[in-house]
Image: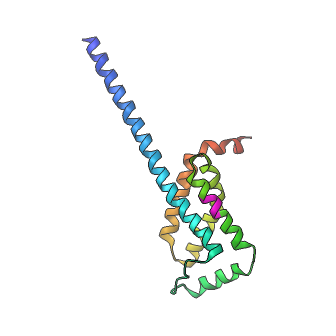
Amino acid sequence: MDMHNTIKNNKFIKHSVNQKLNQLKMKKKILFVVCLLFGLMFINAGLNKFFNYMPVPKDMPKSAMAMFGALMQIPWLMPLIGIAEIIGGILVIIPKSRALGAIIIFPIMVGILLTAISLSSGLPMAFVLFAILVWVIIENWEKYLPMINS
């Protein structure tokens, strides 16, 4: 009877371990797809800073137009943001460099979030993007610890 219970317990443990491994694999796949889409969005936004292929919305509030007009007065700012978005987007897509890409995109994402809050426009999308970025940072937390602990 004891041997039967041991075998039964071993099968349960094997099943539990396999189930946990499958969950981790699925989580990894979901994170990759989400990071791929996230990275492509930032690459697209960065490329748009150089090639202006996305039209400005016709219903953009005057306050937003004034703010973006002011930002355009600094000639090096938009190219710098564009380069950071492209590099950060590429790095977020690649799993080994995802932690670095998240750190590069973080200040840009804070700016996007604050802009969305101040303009009361695009807030749901900004929160979703911010949540994805926070998830990426949490998933890569151990890579940031040497910077904090040293």
Query: 2 or 55: nearer the eye?
Result: 55
Give percent across and percent down for residue 135: 52, 52
Give percent across and percent down for residue 54: 55, 77
- In the depicted structure, whether residue 85 falls above or below residue 51: above
- In the depicted structure, whether residue 98 falls above or below residue 146: below
Query: 51 or 45: nearer the eye?
Result: 51
| The magenta segment | 85-89
Give percent across and percent down for residue 4: 26, 15
Give percent across and percent down for residue 45: 58, 69
Q: Is residue 150 left or right of residue 128?
A: right
Q: Farthest residue in the left direction?
A: 1
The N terminus sits in image quarter: top left
- The answer to if 62 sits in the magenta stretch is no
The image quadrant of residue 13 is: top left
Say which residue appears at 61% left-offset and 41% top-offset. Answer: 142
- The answer to if 88 sits in the magenta stretch is yes
Q: Is residue 10 left or right of residue 120?
A: left
- In the depicted structure, whether residue 88 falls above or below residue 25: below
Say which residue appears at 61% left-offset and 54% top-offset. Answer: 91
The C terminus sits in image quarter: top right
Say which residue appears at 51% left-offset and 71% top-offset. Answer: 123
- In the depicted structure, whether residue 146 falls above or below residue 40: above
**Could you tell me what secondary structure mostly forms the magenta stretch?**
helix
Say which residue appears at 72% left-offset and 72% top-offset. Answer: 77
Q: Is residue 130 visible?
A: no
Q: Is residue 50 visible?
A: yes
